[in-house]
Image (cartoon, rainbow, N blue to C red):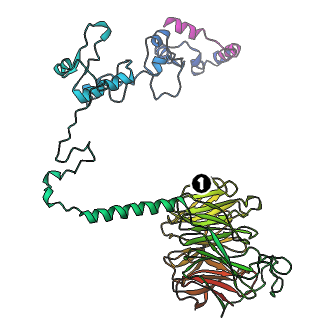
């Protein structure tokens, strides 16, 4: 203390000379207050100064080494603590609810596990042996250190069986199943089921000898028929209905006519379209309902139709409007047809599970494809350099891509949860849109089997018919809630809520939608056989008239005509309206 006082008393500053001059001036004035701050410090004042300590607290070496506790609330540490100090447990009062189990040391979630090495196979062997026979080797005894093995559990049983395990040969898990009359479950051929012991053999109904013979013949015939259907597709043939296949210049019927009053080679649509009002022709030749119609690409001077009578027919749209050729090659109804870009070939999809490629001019079947599933729709890739590839929507929820050159499947798009109903190419054929019985719409990049856009709302219904608008901007989808929904076909594929076409009854039928070439009108058949015409801008139902006796399944507006519409129905007729 005296040393501190001495040091404080002897503490000086650079202004000592100023203090001396001040004391001399005060002495001259004889003022006691003026010289008070120059007098020696009293004892009380010295004690107060000695308690004051402005230096920061610094832990001494001993306290650091002895593991001083570090307050977890501190934001700043004035020394370098060791790892043990940093991670030491927090000090505090005892937990009154702490049980003995909680206090026990733990290194796992469930308790304390001692370090040990046990072979996985040995552990599983002993665990299964214990669960089966009731005994296992004692894990606390090292077998290498003792002469005989010791067991835990059923020790007597272990000694009797000499400690065999479940994996050793000749020892199986005892069969606890009860023996029943008619054999046990292991003898499946003789097993009559759990009620066998209650069956009286005398009262069991059995077929007579004649009935047995008939059943055997029937089953053999059925199996044979099934094998024939699987092995061989229907024989393909064609019938030419016109006298001469070529004209005087050697041109076939695929040649675009020049004398029909319309420029069929033009790529520009008509300036203005008008409502069709009267029937001008009926193509009749199919004996059952017509399922699909397709116009010849670009020109539209020929019409291809597929029917439930298993036949495909090619018709003239101009001139005499004759049936030119019939293609026969499916054993069941034909579901869909599709031309290639130039119209020289077309694909057909039938319920006999075959897809067939035909030559439009000669009628020959070039090749056939199948994956043992029913194809619901088929489309060629519209790109000029991919005309050898086509996709088909199948009944097993897949979209399958074939190469016509090799006849092999080259890609599968397997994301739908129901049968695939339609495939429509959009965005300059880089993408295609598919709809399905799973009430969803999916958008795919070509050759990438993962959909990049999935549209499904709780309020959506299945959309079994989709048509791309002539300008390529919109998709018209026939919804099963009696509406035609319009989705954007570029970028976002959003539903256009301002364009919903209503007023017809189509629930349960895949009625194909059509557009007028100038995008003024939307046409569609319905379940009552009527043709409905809506205005595109206002979505108002303009015109409605009876077109067929049964369902009007498809309506096509001719791409080069102002008011010609072709319809087909389940009454087997194809009609031209103007």
Query: Which residue is label 1 attached to?
Result: 412
Stretch of the chain drawn in magenta: 1-23
Residue situated in front as seen by the camera: 401 or 537: 401
Q: Residue furthest top?
A: 3
Residue situated in front as seen by the camera: 451 or 548: 548
Q: Residue furthest bottom?
A: 278
Instruction: Tell me the SS state at disc 1.
Output: strand
**Residue 107 rendering spot, x and y as whole percentages:** 37, 24
Q: Relative to 298, say whether 174 is above or below.
A: above
Q: Relative to 457, say whether 22 is above or below.
A: above
**Residue 452 rendering spot, x and y as whole percentages:** 61, 56
**Residue 466 rendering spot, x and y as whole percentages:** 61, 71
Q: Residue furthest right?
A: 249
Residue situated in front as seen by the camera: 491 or 98: 491
Instruction: Tell me the quarter of the picture where residue 267 sits.
Output: bottom right
Check if residue 13 falls in the magenta segment: yes
At 74% across and 81% down in the image, what residue appears? 518
Check if residue 395 falls in the magenta segment: no
Q: Is residue 102 visible?
A: no
Q: How would you rate the neighbour count of disc 1 (Cα within 10 Å): few for under 14, some for 14-19, many for 20 or more?
A: some
Residue situated in front as seen by the camera: 564 or 176: 176
Is residue 199 shown left or right of residue 285? left
Q: Relative to 298, say whether 187 is above or below.
A: above
Q: Main secondary structure of the magenta part?
A: helix
């Amino acid at each position: 203390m005296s040393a501190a006082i001495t040091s404080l008393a002897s503490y000086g500053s650079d202004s000592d000379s100023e203090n001396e001059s001040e004391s001399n001036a005060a002495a001259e004035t004889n003022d006691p207050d003026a010289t008070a701050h120059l007098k020696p410090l009293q004892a009380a004042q010295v004690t107060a100064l000695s308690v004051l300590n402005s230096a920061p607290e610094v832990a001494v070496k001993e306290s650091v080494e002895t593991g001083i506790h570090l307050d977890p609330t501190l934001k700043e540490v004035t020394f370098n603590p060791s790892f043990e100090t940093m991670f030491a447990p927090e000090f505090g009062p005892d937990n009154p609810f702490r049980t003995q189990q909680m206090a026990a040391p733990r290194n796992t979630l469930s308790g304390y596990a001692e370090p040990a090495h046990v072979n996985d196979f040995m552990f599983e062997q002993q665990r299964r042996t214990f669960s089966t026979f009731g005994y296992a080797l004692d894990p606390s005894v090292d077998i290498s250190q003792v002469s005989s093995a010791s067991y835990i559990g059923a020790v007597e049983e272990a000694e009797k069986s000499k400690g065999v395990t479940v994996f050793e040969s000749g020892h199986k898990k005892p069969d606890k199943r009860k023996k029943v009359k008619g054999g046990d479950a292991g003898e499946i051929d003789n097993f009559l089921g759990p009620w066998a012991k209650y069956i009286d053999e005398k009262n069991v109904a059995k077929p007579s000898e004649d009935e047995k013979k008939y059943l055997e013949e029937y089953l053999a015939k059925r199996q044979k028929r099934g094998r024939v259907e699987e092995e061989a597709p229907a024989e393909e043939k064609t019938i030419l209905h016109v006298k001469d296949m070529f004209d005087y210049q050697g041109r076939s019927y695929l040649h675009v006519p020049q004398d029909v009053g319309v420029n069929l080679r033009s790529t520009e649509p008509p300036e203005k379209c008008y409502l069709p009002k009267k029937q001008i022709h009926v193509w009749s030749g199919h004996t059952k309902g017509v399922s699909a119609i397709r116009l010849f690409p670009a020109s539209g001077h020929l019409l291809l139709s597929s029917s439930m009578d298993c036949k495909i027919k090619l018709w003239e749209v101009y001139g005499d409007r004759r049936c030119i050729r019939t293609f026969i090659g499916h054993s069941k109804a034909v579901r869909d047809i599709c031309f290639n870009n130039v119209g020289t070939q077309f694909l057909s999809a039938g319920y006999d599970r075959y897809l067939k490629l035909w030559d439009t001019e000669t009628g020959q079947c070039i090749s056939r494809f199948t994956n043992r599933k029913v194809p619901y729709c088929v489309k060629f890739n519209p790109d000029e350099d991919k005309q050898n590839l086509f996709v088909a929507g199948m009944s097993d929820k897949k979209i399958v891509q074939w190469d016509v050159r090799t006849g092999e499947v080259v890609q599968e798009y397997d994301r739908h949860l129901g049968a695939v109903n339609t495939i429509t190419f959009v965005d300059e054929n880089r993408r295609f849109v598919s709809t399905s019985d799973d009430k969803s719409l999916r958008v795919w990049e070509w050759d990438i089997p993962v959909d990049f856009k999935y549209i499904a709302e709780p309020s959506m219904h299945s959309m079994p018919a989709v048509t791309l608008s002539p300008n390529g901007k919109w998709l018209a989808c026939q919804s099963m809630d009696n509406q035609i929904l319009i989705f954007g076909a570029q970028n976002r594929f959003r539903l256009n809520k301002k364009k919903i076409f209503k007023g017809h009854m189509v629930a349960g039928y895949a009625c194909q939608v059509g557009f007028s070439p100038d995008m003024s009108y939307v046409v569609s058949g319905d379940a009552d056989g009527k043709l409905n015409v809506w205005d595109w801008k206002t979505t108002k139902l303009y015109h409605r008239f009876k077109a067929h006796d049964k369902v009007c399944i498809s309506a096509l507006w001719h791409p080069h005509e102002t008011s010609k519409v072709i319809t087909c129905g389940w009454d087997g007729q194809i009609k031209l309206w103007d």
